[in-house]
């Protein structure tokens, strides 16, 4: 139902996203977009770039008087840092010889690939020796565009009382135990995570996480971790099992793995299930005549499955986790090889974040929203909001 593309280089003039397949009549709140963009930029451990950019989204097509038209929605995010890169990123001009030193340095150091980035493999793949041609698009700056797309998709889902949260459950070796927080009250998770510099909901764990980032920064190193995304209010029945690609779990894990630096993703108890007994893993079923119509009144007292069974939503909270590796650009450069001279060298250093796990939770919410909105529209119809509302109400009112 929903297709989208993003374009734009990290230090180019702008990022652009075009979303097709949205229904007509959906109210779009520009404040929602602004809020989601700001959330992606926050977090202890982000680098200097975040101080330069305050991402603002311009909507240039597909919305009129605050509602979608059913035509493609185009979103633009200007890169404020562009002003500092005009010569280096100009589409046609060659870098003049007399360009002042700083720009020459920025332009020429890009023959020294950073281990852990797309730099070398991308350079070989596209036959680029100026690795800026790779890193400009491989950069996670692109995720700003996806957070904007996610905000639009999320506004559709929130219209149907589907709510999102994310929080950080691990930074480096500092872990938040599953038993230390409850998923029963998603509003509380939102409140606590939004108030935390690292989006951690337990203050003494938060303090340890901040200390770990500070120590890594001091030794000019970087840290990874794990973010958890939670979605509540989903109806039973999104996704499918008839083909592998229809399984919602495969789509969601794929979406989370598309976040730069993601190395693993899991649903519910995920990898833990592998070492447990069946009787400890599966969520037993009960029925309550006055239970939630979104779940057709079936009840699970546990949710180890994390909201998906057989590739289909169960109506329980969706619980997803994504693990990211430490940032690859180190202020203490790793050893590399210059792709022109083939001599040993130190990896190039771009201005860099030092821990992005809090932002990964926010991006995780966005990519999850995109997949869920697509599934929601394929189940409940897609041309206009009033029609989708009627279909949804009919689904809720129909007894199983
Ligand atoms: C929000 C966000 C910000 C990032 N910022 C940086 C950064 O400043 N420096 C860096 O080296 N990597 C950064 N990364 C990670 C790289 O984009 C990523 O490691 C790289 O593209 C290689 O892809 P891979 O790790 O998926 O293999 C960031 C990732 C995310 C999600």
Image (cartoon, grey):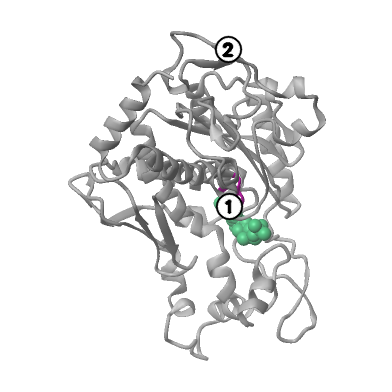
**Number of numbered discs visible in the structure rendering:** 2
In the image shown, does 147 or 158 lie closer to the viewer?
158
Callout 2: few (<14), some (14-19), or many (20+) C-alpha neighbours within 10 Å?
few
Query: Magenta stretch mostly in which secondary structure?
Result: helix
Q: Is residue 329 left or right of 318 when viewed as pictured? A: right
Q: Residue at x 39, y 18 (%)?
A: 399
In the image shown, does 10 or 208 lie closer to the viewer?
10
Q: Residue at x 32, y 44 (%)?
A: 382
In the image shown, does 126 or 171 lie closer to the viewer?
126
Residue 240 picture location, percent across and down: 53, 40
Which badge, 1 or 2, comes first in the chain's sequence? Answer: 1
The vertical placement of 381 against 395, above or below, is below
Q: Is residue 209 left or right of 148 when viewed as pictured? A: right
Q: Is residue 223 magenta?
A: no
The residue range painted magenta reads 253-258
Residue 174 picture location, percent across and down: 74, 35
The vertical placement of 161 against 56, above or below, is above
Q: Is residue 144 left or right of 253 when viewed as pictured? A: left
**Residue 12 seen by the camera:** yes
Dot 1 beta carbon under 8 Å from ligand 1: yes
State the mark number for residue 259: 1
State the mark number for residue 286: 2
Q: Of tags 1 and 2, which is closer to the observer?
A: 2
Quarter location, residue 233: top left
Q: Quadrant of ligand 1?
A: bottom right
Callout 1: few (<14), some (14-19), or many (20+) C-alpha neighbours within 10 Å?
some
Q: Is residue 256 magenta?
A: yes
């Amino acid at each position: 139902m929903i297709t989208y593309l993003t374009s734009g280089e990290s230090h180019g003039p702008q990022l652009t996203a075009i979303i097709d397949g949205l229904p007509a009549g959906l109210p779009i709140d520009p404040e929602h977009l602004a809020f989601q963009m700001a959330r992606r930029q926050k977090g202890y451990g982000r680098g200097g770039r975040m101080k330069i950019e305050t991402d603002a989204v311009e909507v240039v097509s597909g919305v009129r008087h605050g509602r979608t038209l059913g035509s493609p929605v185009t979103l633009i995010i200007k890169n404020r840092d562009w002003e500092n890169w005009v010569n280096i990123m100009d589409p046609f001009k060659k870098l003049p010889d007399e360009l002042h030193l700083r720009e020459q340095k920025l332009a020429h150091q890009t023959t020294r690939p950073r281990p852990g980035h797309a730099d070398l493999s991308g350079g070989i793949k596209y036959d680029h020796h100026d690795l800026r041609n790779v890193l400009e698009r491989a950069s996670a700056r692109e995720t700003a565009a996806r957070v904007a797309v996610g905000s639009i998709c999320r506004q559709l889902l929130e219209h149907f009382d589907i709510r999102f949260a994310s929080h950080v459950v691990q930074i480096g070796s500092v872990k938040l135990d599953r038993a230390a927080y409850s998923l029963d009250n998603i509003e509380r998770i939102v409140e606590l995570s939004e108030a935390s510099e690292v989006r951690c909901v337990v203050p003494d764990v938060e303090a340890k996480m901040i200390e770990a980032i500070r120590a890594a920064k001091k030794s000019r190193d970087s840290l990874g971790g794990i973010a958890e995304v939670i979605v509540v209010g989903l109806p039973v029945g999104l996704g499918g099992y008839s083909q592998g690609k229809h399984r919602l779990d495969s789509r969601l894990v794929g979406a989370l793995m598309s976040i730069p630096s993601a190395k693993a993703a899991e649903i519910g108890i995920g990898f833990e299930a592998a070492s447990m007994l069946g009787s400890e893993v599966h969520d037993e079923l009960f029925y309550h005549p006055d239970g939630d119509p979104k779940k057709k009144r079936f009840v699970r007292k546990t949710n180890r499955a994390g909201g998906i069974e057989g590739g289909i939503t169960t109506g329980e909270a969706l619980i997803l986790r994504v693990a990211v590796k430490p940032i690859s650009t180190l202020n203490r450069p790793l050893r590399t090889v210059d792709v022109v001279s083939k001599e040993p060298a130190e990896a190039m250093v771009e201005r860099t974040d030092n821990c992005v796990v809090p932002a990964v939770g926010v991006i995780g919410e966005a990519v999850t929203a995109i997949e869920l909105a697509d599934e929601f529209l394929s189940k409940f119809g897609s041309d206009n909001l009033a029609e989708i509302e009627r279909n949804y109400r009919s689904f809720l009112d129909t007894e199983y």
